Image: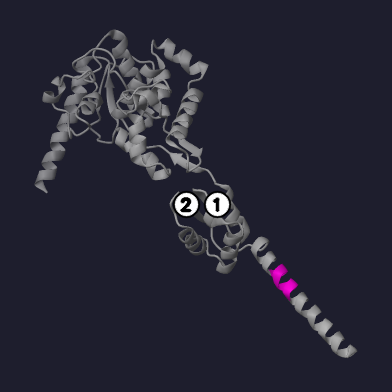
Amino acid sequence: MKSKILWAALAAMVMFAGIGGFVVGRYYIDNKKPNFTKDYVLYVYPDTPMEQVLDSLCAGAGAVRPKSVERAFAKVEVAQKMQPGRYVIDPSCTSIYAARMLVFGWQTPQNLTLSGTIRSKGVLAKKIAMQMMVDSASVASALSDEDFLAGYGFTSEDVFGLVLPDTYQMYWTASVEEIFDRFKKEYDAFWTPERIAKAEAQGLTRKEVSVVASIVSGETLKSFEYPIIAGVYLNRYKKGMKLQADPTVCFCFDYKLDRVLKKHLTVDSPYNTYKYVGLPPAPINVPPKACLDAVLDPDRHGYIYFCASPAFDGTHRFAVTYTEHMKNARAFQRELTARRRAQRSK
């Protein structure tokens, strides 16, 4: 009898030890052992089903033990508590840590990069929406909302001056307001007392600097030419001349012109600098910081005119006198004519 009791006790001890070992083993696997083989960025939208998130995580991050992830999801109640966000999973993550990321919203900031040519609100809204959770319609609406923009000191007409092309780190789930708050913060940081003083030395406000910079941006893709072209327009502006900037005419036609012809120069718009003296009412695009700085620190020269180089390399030739300018223009026209003839003969 005693031996039976002893064997029963021993069996019970072995069973409990086995259960304990199983529980401890599972705890270690779920909580301490890395469970992924690849770096993966998991995007969770507000209406994404938990099953879809689970499948995406296991497949995208290469889960070694998918059942471990399932247990972790159940333990911390991911289905009920999951928060939208951009989550970066790496091979060092355990199942429980990945699950907790989703529950507590431990996001990794997203890079919102604004670069390239931005000449319309639609393009700006699309660039933002492609990188953030907000939709382009919401951004476009904000860009035209006078009451909303007034809080930042801008209007729907001059809002391009608020946005500085750069890379902004923020959470993917940032609201439209949070995104614009960041734009304003960077705008204020850019306009240091030194830059404000330089603008005043040019006889310009901050918004007027943005206007001139947008014209410079529209004239060339060569950054080394920014200060030269800025100097040309400032020379014209200070002499009381019409700016006669082709990019402003293109703006009047929503940038749909292949070439600016004489017939286009008569369009009646305050943005037509061939018709009206002075600066346009607002920026015609989102100018890069380098263009803004070029207006604040322009090259000091006597150039009043410039035209495209006959080298067709995207650069320009500059002139002080109209006679010299016409010489440059004829050289460009001759080369253009020669290239067209060569093209037709092929």
Instruction: Name, please, the residue furthest toward the right.
Output: 2
Determine which residue is flagged by label 1: 81
Q: Position of residue 252 (x, y in %)?
A: 21, 26
Residue 152: image quadrant is top left
Q: Does residue 298 appear in this view? A: no
Give neighbour class at mark 1: few <14, some 14-19, many 20+ (Cα, 10 Å).
Answer: few
Local SS, label 1: helix
Tell me the quadrant of the picture where the N terminus can be found: bottom right
Question: Which residue is located at x 55 percent, y 46 percent?
Answer: 108
Q: Position of residue 315 (x, y in %)?
A: 30, 31
What is the CA distance from the residue labelled 1 to the residue labelled 2?
Answer: 16 Å
Q: Position of residue 242 (x, y in %)?
A: 23, 14
Left or right, 258 with respect to 107, comes to left
Magenta-highlighted residues? 19-25
Question: As shown in the figure, which amino acid type bears the numbered disc 2?
Answer: Tyr
Determine which residue is flagged by label 2: 43
Give the answer, above or below, for where 325 lies relative to 143. Answer: above
* In-front residue for pair 295/173: 173
